[in-house]
Image (spheres, rainbow, N blue to C red):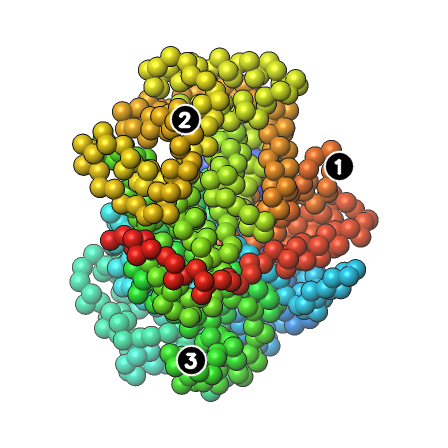
Amino acid sequence: MPLSAHTTFLSHSRILRKYLDGYWPYADSNLSELSQEVFTALREGSPGQPDYIHSSRIRVARRNVPRSFSTYLDHDAPEGGIPERFSLRDRLAHAIRSIEEEFLIERGGMLYVRQSVFEPWQECLTRLSPLPLLAAAAYRHYEGDLAKAQKLVLRTLQHSSLPGCREPELDDMIRAGEVLGEGSFGPGLDDLHIHLNGTTEACQAWLYCLREPYATLCNLQEQWSKPTVRQFYSERGIASNDWLFRLFLLADWLRCWMLELCFPSLTLPGNGEELQPYNQALTLEELRDGLSLTSSRRHPHFTWRGKRFGHPMDTRRLKYPLPRKHKITPLQMEGVFLLYAIDELFCGNCRRFPVMLHCYLLLQNYFVQLTVQQKEQVGFDQFQHITDNALRDAVEKEYKERFNQLHGMYGPDLSYVEGRFSPPDDPAKCIALVERIVQGYWLQFPSLRPDNDSRYDSKKAKTEGQNEKHIRDFPASFTLRLVAHFIKKPDSVAEENYCRHYALRRDLERRCGALLEAYRRSPRVRNFLVGVDAAANEMHAPPEVFAPVFRRCRKVVNNFTYHVGEDYLHLVSGIRAIAEAILYLDLKSGDRLGHCTALGIDPDIWLRAMGKKCYCPRGEWLDNLVWMAHVLEGNSDFSSELAAFKEEINQLYAEIYQKPEISRRILFSAWKLRDIDPLKSVWMESEWTSWNMIPFFTHFETAYAVGRIKNQLEAYEQFRLYHNPKYRKKFNEIIAVDTKKTPPELLRFLQDHLVGHLNEKHLIVEVMPTSNLFISFYQNYKEHHIFRWMEKNPDRPVPQFCLGSDDPGIFATNMRNEITHLLHIARELYPGSNSPMGAMRSLVRRGRAARFSRNAGYEENIEDQDSDWSIS
């Protein structure tokens, strides 16, 4: 969906750059420059459209000026622009009012998104902070009555900044549960795939960065050495971490000055002194020149900036006071501030205020675009740039506010959460991390704390509980369980690395040993840990690398899941990776697989995105051919493709290994052996000791390797060649693959074949609609494969599946909104039917059934672990 002129005006970096370069549109005539920037930004966003379309979009944006804005003038604009006689106040007020009127509505004392525009709203959240729009909607609903509007803002922003649609049936299902035939489930939704880091909403992260810019700067400095991080910021015109840090200071400065203009002669936070009206015009000139940020911190702003904690609204004597005896969250504070800012914008007469507010909103929305995945950022690499950019690192060191956020705007929404976390490589740090997560959980839900837990800060919890009681009763709790996910990392082709992913395998050894030792030492870890996973970019490491640690963990952990088939160089690569995960990780009934979009995506959609060619390593395509040849053996429908695959297998094998053709049976058997840990099996190869190999191994893994190898020596020889650094360069060379080699009918056959295998093993797929929409090749929710799976076409098998939110902060979503998107599309696809709501109930029931159970057999198994497991 192309950006509207209003959205562009409030969010585009070109306009922000104008301000940072010293442009201040006080004079009405200066607004023509701003108009030209909007026009240029629209043209950049839709380069395939002629200029008259962009001009028309701007003209349409000028129509229907609200009657309350008497200063609007009714005459034509210059070509592609906004009328020069429009003031910035008019333009800004009209943009905010137009967007919030399009999307938001009040019902029953809460703010909601209109059902008809929920999907465009989701895309809008990638560009705009919802806070000013929610404040403006509250202001409009009560026609400028600040007392009532303030109560609505406080009520709306108790927990989350993400509104949803009003769906009475969905509300009833979430709050009361349902009885379906012989089964039943209680209130709330299950989020079975949520990464705790990546959960914080952009608005919460923004407020923390303004409150603690130095903590954010420290994290930026730590991450700045990564080339991917520097590339991410460089693409957005950010040359240094210090420049971004100064934007936070600028935004905080603007907010404090706007408060001073709204509430003159009130005390500055922190020092108790009156803000002297020292030549505001001079200060604005300093702002034009960079707020003295290129010099030292001697500016008056910095004399008190470091002393303040919390929101600058804390010390303001408002016309309608906040409940001072009780804690108001920073999110609510910001909402109230923006409400008063909207009132000043609509009714005030200070010429400086619209400039400050516009610049502040541009900065806020610029931050949103750095922390929420954009529609044009397709693929996991783009997603990982956001996870690595350090803007959430500081705020996500504590967990209480995240559990408060998961309550939802209209909640409680959830009954059960399986939160993912990455285990450190030290047992003590692993225990401390789990302790910190659990302490945040208990601070949010004090009633769940065991009475005998001596580590719990009861005084802090009691104080926080009393402070929050006026705003809300303690929210209904959800059950928290934890899943440890190991991280995939790219391989190094160094000659001394005698096997693939040597460094990652060693790192996994340490982290797995630390996790199991933490599990042995800590009852807290044993009580909350229910599963093991491996996450991050699947193109960095295949499932085979994680097979040894999954085997090791299976001695004490019952449940496993694995991120796979989410992003891939070729659709067959994604499908094969899922087959490898099932095989190498020995997934069993009740285990799950994360994403698996390769199993569900319509091959025509993938082919549409790829075109005539796709590109992948030569060895990866060889693996695809070997796997496809095995699956297609004996299938007469694809005999011509099979013959072509056999010929290409011999060609690629000779190119990589410089050897004559080899039996496909041996190649496939060697492929099946890849779950063997080369760090444990290589000790048997005396000729490899000259590579300075140190044989770290355990009796269990050695016995496993010997048992797999002893009757497959030819396949094992090929396994050795696969790991030999001598052949990896040719293996990793990128080649072009004609997509016609795998027609849509073949790809569907491979998908259905593997879905049947999943169903035989009773495995469950974790589906995250919004995450899949942004990372995969879908253009809208309607294309998502979940609707085909929900339809249950008798001609094609359908896997068992459940829902998750993945990274709700990065994708600006939550479980309620995920189900709402599905409900709206299902209604569109099946109009007049009662089945859409029934399908949602079925999804909720599936989630309840797919929960990971508590681990059993700890006492019998944990003490059996070899001391050799802990690798230093």
Kind of residue sitting beneath label 3: Asp
Q: Which of 488/604 is in front?
A: 488
User: Residue 49 in the image: x percent, y percent?
Assistant: 54, 31
Q: Residues within 10 Å of mark 3 (few under 14, many from 20)?
A: few
Q: Which residue is disc 2 drawn over?
A: 715
- Can residue 205 be seen here? The reply is yes
Quarter holding residue 601? top right
Instruction: Say which element carries label 1.
Output: loop
Q: Which residue is disc 1 drawn over?
A: 794
Tell me the residue at 41%/38% (across/down): 707
Proximity of marks 1 and 2: CB atoms separated by less than 8 Å:
no
718 above or below 504? above
| Residue found at the far bottom of this picture | 325
Q: CA distance from mark 1 to mark 2?
A: 40 Å
Q: Which label's residue is closer to the chain start, 3 or 1?
A: 3
Q: Which of 851/228 is in front?
A: 851
Q: Which label's residue is closer to the chain start, 1 or 2?
A: 2
